[in-house]
Image: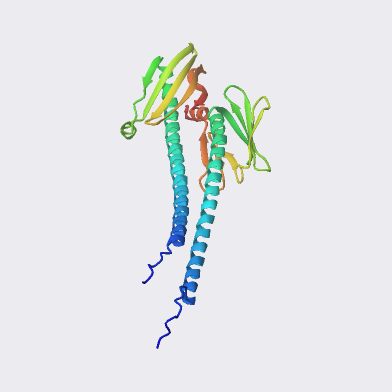
Amino acid sequence: MPCANRKIRFGFTMIEIMAALSLLVIFFAASGEIFKSTVLLGSASQNLCDRASQIDSALHPLRTDVWNCRSMRVVDPRFIKLSLADGGNISWKIDSQNCVVRTDAAGHAERWDAIGAGWSFSTDNVSLSLSDGTPIPMRMISQILLAQSEQP
Amino acid sequence: MKPAPRRRAGFAMITAIMLMSLAAMTMTLLGTTIINQARRTQILSEDAELRQLLIAGAAFAEIEAESNSAGRVSVPLPDPLERNSAGLTIEFHSNSPTEKIAEVEASLPHHRLSQQLTVSFENGLWQLTAANLNR
C-alpha cells in the first residue's frame, strides 16, 4: 500500500541543473565576447575617425601650399621646402616622433601629432607625392608648375 | 489539487534581451563606422574631381586671358560631366593691363571648390603666377 503521507518535493534533477549550468556558461561566454567586441569596435571606430580627421586637417594646408608653389625641393624623404607664388617659403617636416610640422616664412610652426608614421615625400617637379607605405601614393599638383610645364 | 506549473522564463528572457541589445549596439557601431567612411570616401572622390575641373579651368583661364575676356565665362564641359550637373565658371577682373585675376569655380550638385588665379603678362605671353585654392 502506498504511503499516504509521502511528501511531494519540488526540485530539480541533477541533469536539469547541469543542462541549466551549461546553458548559462554558453550565454555568459557569448555575452562576454559580444561585449568585448562592442567595446573594441567603439574604441577602434573612434580612433579611426580621430585619425582620419587629423590627417585631413594636415593634408588640407599641405595641398593648398603645393597648389600655389613655384618650386619644391625634397631635402630628404621626410623634409620638403616649398617656395610659394607670393615669395614666401614653407617647409614641411616629419620628425622622429612622426609629428608633421609645417613652418611658414615667419617661423610659425604648426604640428599634427603622430600621424606621419611611414610617410615620405617625393617630387617630379610638377607634383608632390606623399607615400604612407601603401602601393599608391597621394599626388598633389602644383597648379603653377603644371601651367609652366604646359607652356611652349 | 494539482498546483499550477510555475513559469521560470525570467532569467532566460533577461539574458536573451541583454545579448540582443549588445548585438544591436555592435551592429549600430559597425553601421555608423561604415557609413562615415563611405561618406568620407565620396567627399574625397568629389574633391579630386573638382580639383581636376579647377586644373582645366586654369588652362582655360590662361587662353581666355590672351583673348582679353572680361566678366563671367562658363566653360563647356564634356557630356558625362554635364549629365552629372558639374559646372565650371571663370570670372575675370582686370587689375592692370599686365595682370588679371580669375576666379575659377568648379561645382558638383552638393559640393563646390574654387581658386583665385593671377595671370600676368610676362615675356610676351600670359602666364599663371599665383593660384590660391579656396574651400
Q: Residue B82 occupies which quadrant of the picture?
A: top left
Q: Is residue B69 visible?
A: no
Q: Nearer the viewer, residue A84 or A34?
A: A34
Give left or right: position of B57 versus A81: left
* Residue at x 47% of width, y 19% of height: B126
Q: Is residue B22 visible?
A: yes
Q: Nearer the viewer, residue B63 or B56?
A: B56
Q: Is residue B93 depicted above or below B31 in this figure?
A: above
Q: Is residue B96 depicted above or below A67 in this figure?
A: above
Q: Nearer the viewer, residue B49 or B59?
A: B49
Q: Residue A4 occupies which quadrant of the picture?
A: bottom left
Q: In the image, residue A68 lies at what x, y percent?
A: 54, 27
Direction front: furthest residue? A4
Q: Quadrant of the N terminus of chain B?
A: bottom left
Q: In the image, residue A106 lies at what x, y percent?
A: 67, 24
Give the color scheme: rainbow, by chain, secondary structure or one colour.
Answer: rainbow
* Residue at x 45% of width, y 32% of height: B51
Q: In the image, residue A57 lies at what x, y percent?
A: 55, 35
How many numbered discs, if any?
A: 0
Q: Is residue B68 depicted above or below A63 in this figure?
A: above
Q: Residue A99 occupies which quadrant of the picture?
A: top right
Q: In the image, residue A120 lies at what x, y percent?
A: 60, 42
Direction bottom: furthest residue? A1
